[in-house]
Image: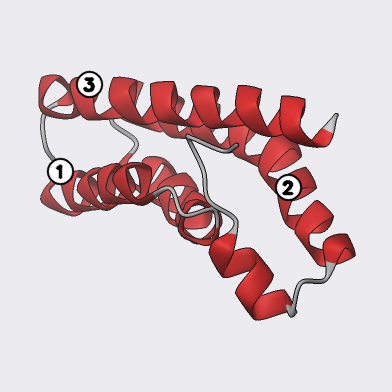
Amino acid sequence: MAIHYNLAKVYAISDDDEDFVRQIITLFVEEVPGDVKQMKEGIKEKDYAKAYGFAHKTKPTLDLLGMDAAKDEILQIEQWTRDKGKKKEIKEVYKSLKGRIDAALDEVKKDFNV
């Protein structure tokens, strides 16, 4: 049973289409880790546009997967980029986001054998 993600939205918008669900899962597994890494680099370099771009790109996937806390953290990162904040202000938010995504990735990989 999924603890770190929830596929209810994916099933709802796809009319329970298993192929579509697999596509979303594959997108999450293949794209999100690299995007999160790029987001971290943007934060580290204070490249606000880069951090924002990868946060914004990741947000719909987290929303679809019912990862509400992670989505809230993405929104905080987006706001930090708009405010051009200090790195120390966003480090813990990023760390928490990464932990949530890593836990969901581990779970998804086990649940879907990917």
Tell me where residue 34 appears, x and y as whole percent.
63, 31
- Please name the residue that numbered disc 2 is placed on: 25
Indicate the secondary structure of the residue bearing disc 3: helix
Residue 45 placement, left or right of 53: left
* Mark 3 Cα shell of 10 Å, populated few (<14), some (14-19), many (≥20): some
Residue 78, compared with residue 110, is above or below; it is below
Q: Residue at x 41, y 21 (%)?
A: 99
Q: Are marks 2 and 3 in contact (CB under 8 Å)?
A: no
Q: Residue at x 20, y 21 (%)?
A: 92
Indicate the secondary structure of the residue bearing disc 2: helix
Nearer to us: label 1 or label 3: 3
* Mark 2 Cα shell of 10 Å, populated few (<14), some (14-19), many (≥20): many
Nearer to us: label 2 or label 1: 2
Tell me where residue 35 appears, x and y as whole percent.
57, 37
Three-letter code for the amino acid on which mark 1 is drawn: Lys
Name the residue nearer the viewer: 111 or 58: 111
Q: Of callouts 2 and 1, which one flags the residue occurring earlier in the amino acid sequence?
A: 2
User: How many numbered marks have been drawn onto this rendered protein structure?
Assistant: 3
Q: CA distance from mark 2 to mark 3?
A: 27 Å
Q: CA distance from mark 1 to mark 3?
A: 14 Å
Three-letter code for the amino acid on which mark 3 is drawn: Lys
- Please name the residue that numbered disc 3 is placed on: 91
Name the residue nearer the viewer: 19 or 41: 19
The quadrant the N terminus occupies is: top right
- Please name the residue that numbered disc 1 is placed on: 84
Q: CA distance from mark 2 to mark 1?
A: 33 Å
Tell me where residue 17 appears, x and y as whole percent.
83, 71
Q: Quadrant of residue 96?
A: top left
Q: Quadrant of residue 45?
A: top left
Three-letter code for the amino acid on which mark 2 is drawn: Ile
Name the residue nearer the viewer: 111 or 56: 111
Residue 61 placement, left or right of 100: right
